[in-house]
Amino acid sequence: MSIVEYFDHPFRKQDKEHFKHLVQVALADGIIENSELKMLHQLGRNMGLTGAEMDELLEIEKRSEYNPPYKLARRFKQLYGIVKMILADGNISNDEMRLTHKLALTSGFPEIEVPILLTFLIDGIRNGEEEENLFIRYKERRKSL
């Protein structure tokens, strides 16, 4: 860990950690396709990461400890990004699905809810629904459970 990382804002650290998870999801099938790499760079830019930071994080192969965000909205946003990543190449492998399931659990989503949530996100993204609308629908569904 470099000295600069000690001074990173907690949200910045979470974004970098989330980017690493996106890389792990992209690598779950053994290769990062061009479409996945393009998606990684798009999501990284949306998080405010520089090209150099993304390249460095892409190279890191070690697993690091994950500290999920406290707020449901940020956890949902991160899971949305992960699901979007596994859909980037048009195929969802069993390895990608297992890793996404594990990351959802690690993020604090209840085990009983994760399969339903992942199906909900996959269907929503495939149908072109925006993240904000999916989050609103998810919160409404969650109240009824």
Image (spheres, rainbow, N blue to C red):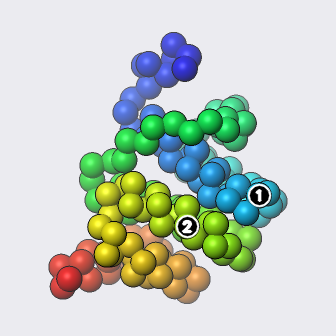
Q: Secondary structure at mark 1?
A: loop
Q: What x and y, as percent, mark residue 33?
A: 80, 61
Crowding at mark 1 (Cα within 10 Å: few <14, some 14-19, many 20+): few
| Residue 138 showing in the rendered view | yes
Q: Secondary structure at mark 2?
A: helix
Q: Residue at x 47, y 60 (%)?
A: 102
Mark 1 highlights which residue?
30
Q: What x and y, as percent, mark residue 64?
A: 51, 36
Crowding at mark 2 (Cα within 10 Å: few <14, some 14-19, many 20+): few
Query: Which of the numbered marks, if any, corresponds to residue 98?
Result: 2
Q: Residue at x 56, y 39 (%)?
A: 63
Quarter holding the C terminus is: bottom left
Q: Amino acid at mark 1?
A: Gly
Q: Residue at x 38, y 61 (%)?
A: 105
The alpha-carbon separation of the residues under discs 1 and 2 comes to 14 Å
* In the image: residue 81, left or right of residue 7: right
The part of the image, by quadrant, that contains residue 98 is bottom right
| Residue 51 showing in the rendered view | no
Give 132 or 21, whichever is nearer the viewer.
Answer: 21
Q: Earlier in the sequence, mark 1 or mark 2?
A: 1
Q: What x and y, as percent, mark residue 18?
A: 50, 47
Q: What x and y, as percent, mark residue 31?
A: 79, 57
Give 66 or 43, whichever is nearer the viewer.
Answer: 66
